[in-house]
Image (tube, rainbow, N blue to C red):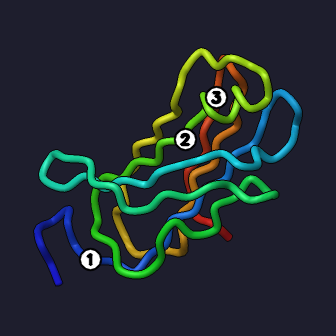
Amino acid sequence: MTLDNDRQVISMGISARALDGVYGTPATGLRARLEQSVDGCWLPIADAETNADGTIDDFVTGRLLRGPYRIIFDSDQYFSALGASAAYPEIIIVFRLRSESRTCQVQVLMTPYSYSLYFGDRA
């Protein structure tokens, strides 16, 4: 099924991992939301929370449309629960699914005042 060049249906999954850079541990209990851009609007697909390993194994698997997606991590809630105040209330990672592949993974290493990102295939 082809919708247009960037909106083809593909079989793929999306997972996420969050690491706490302050304590050097997985960011357990971090809330996150996966959204997809459709006609210029962000539509929610799934809500999840990281497990004890800081992982959301599969936000969604199966048939996805090629195109832009984003994951919104609730860093404010996470750091508030630890008694810290974050400089930013959310970490928003925008990425594009382009082709059929293994499950893609978004990984973020975060502290209250910075974060870094990895995006790639989950082995």
The amino acid type, in three-letter code, at marker 2 is Phe
Image: 104 above or below 62:
above
Q: Residues within 10 Å of mark 1 (few under 14, many from 20)?
A: some
Q: Residue at x 19, y 47 (%)?
A: 41
Image: 31 above or below 11:
above
Viewport quadrant of the N terminus: bottom left
User: Which residue is identified by label 2?
Assistant: 73
Query: In terms of depth relative to the viewer, which is nearer, 118 or 61?
Result: 61
Local SS, label 1: strand
Image coordinates for residue 16, horizontal then vertical, percent: 60, 56
- Sequence-earlier tag: 1 or 2: 1
How many numbered tags mark residues here? 3
Q: Residue at x 69, y 21 (%)?
A: 112
The amino acid type, in three-letter code, at marker 3 is Tyr
105 left or right, relative to 18: left
Marks 3 and 2, how far apart in space? Answer: 11 Å
Image: 72 above or below 111:
below
Query: In terms of depth relative to the viewer, which is nearer, 89 or 123?
Result: 89
- Sequence-earlier tag: 3 or 2: 2
Mark 1 or 2, which is nearer the eye? 2
Q: Residues within 10 Å of mark 3 (few under 14, many from 20)?
A: few
Image coordinates for residue 26, horizontal then vertical, percent: 80, 47
Local SS, label 2: strand
Image coordinates for residue 109, horizontal then vertical, percent: 70, 37
Image coordinates for residue 44, horizontal then vertical, percent: 34, 55
User: Which residue is identified by label 1?
Assistant: 9
Query: In terms of depth relative to the viewer, which is nearer, 85 or 95?
Result: 85
Q: Residue at x 37, y 62 (%)?
A: 45
